[in-house]
Image (spheres, rainbow, N blue to C red):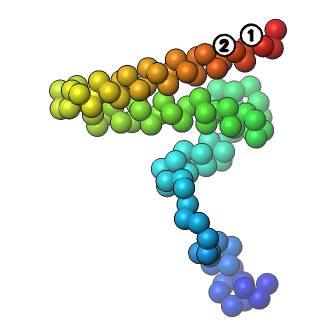
């Protein structure tokens, strides 16, 4: 309450800068995590009404890496930078293969 009286309610609700380690996560990555967390899972095609930690984590792990590569491919076109485009395509493919093998392991281990 003292903080709100001193700084105002809106400012008091914000986090103040703190000592310690710098943030490891970029602002883009933070936005990628916060955006789905602020939406209903049904909006993203899930049958659930609310996020669980496990469901949100799975969503981020499945869509995060591929989204980054797909965004990079918008900038790294085949015509502009063919080598970088090919490397990004390769990385995207490897990521999709890794996700597919993890998903296959999860679905077969539940049987």
Left or right: 73, with 92 as reference point: left
Q: Secondary structure at mark 1?
A: helix
Residue on which disc 2 sits: 104
- In the figure, is residue 88 to the left or right of 35? left
Q: Quadrant of residue 98?
A: top right
4 up-or-down from 44: above or below: below
For residue 108, which numbered disc appears in the image? 1
- Within 10 Å of the Cα at label 1, are there few (<14), some (14-19), or many (20+) other Cα atoms? few
Question: What's the residue at 54%, 36% (across, down)?
Answer: 64
Q: As drawn, is 19 to the left or to the right of 47? A: left
Quadrant that contains the C terminus: top right
- Taking the view exactly as shown, the residue that stands out farthest to the bottom is 6
Image coords of residue 87 (percent x, y): 32, 27
Task: Determine whether the residue tagged by mark 2 lies in a helix, strand or loop.
Answer: helix
At 62% from the left edge and 42% from the top edge, which residue is drawn? 36
Q: Are marks 1 and 2 in contact (CB under 8 Å)?
A: yes
- Residue 50: tell me if it is visible: no
59 horizontally vs 30: left or right: right
Q: Is residue 90 above or below residue 44?
A: above
Residue at the image position 72 percent from the left and 85 percent from the top:
3
- In depth, the one of 107 and 41 nearer the eye is 107
Residue 71 screen position, x and y as percent: 39, 36
Q: Is residue 20 visible?
A: yes
> Residue 27: horizontal and vertical position, in percent?
49, 55
Q: Residue furthest right?
A: 111
| Residue at mark 1 to residue at mark 2: CA–CA distance | 6 Å
């Amino acid at each position: 309450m003292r903080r709100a009286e001193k700084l105002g309610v809106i400012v008091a609700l914000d986090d103040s800068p703190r000592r310690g380690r710098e943030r490891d996560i970029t602002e883009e990555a933070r936005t990628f995590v916060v955006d789905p967390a602020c939406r209903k899972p049904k909006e993203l095609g899930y049958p659930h009404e609310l996020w669980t930690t496990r469901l949100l984590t799975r969503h981020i792990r499945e869509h995060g890496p591929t989204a980054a590569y797909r965004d990079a491919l918008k900038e790294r076109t085949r015509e502009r930078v063919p080598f970088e485009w090919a490397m990004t395509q390769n990385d995207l493919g490897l990521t999709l293969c890794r996700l597919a093998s993890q998903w296959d392991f999860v679905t077969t281990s539940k049987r």
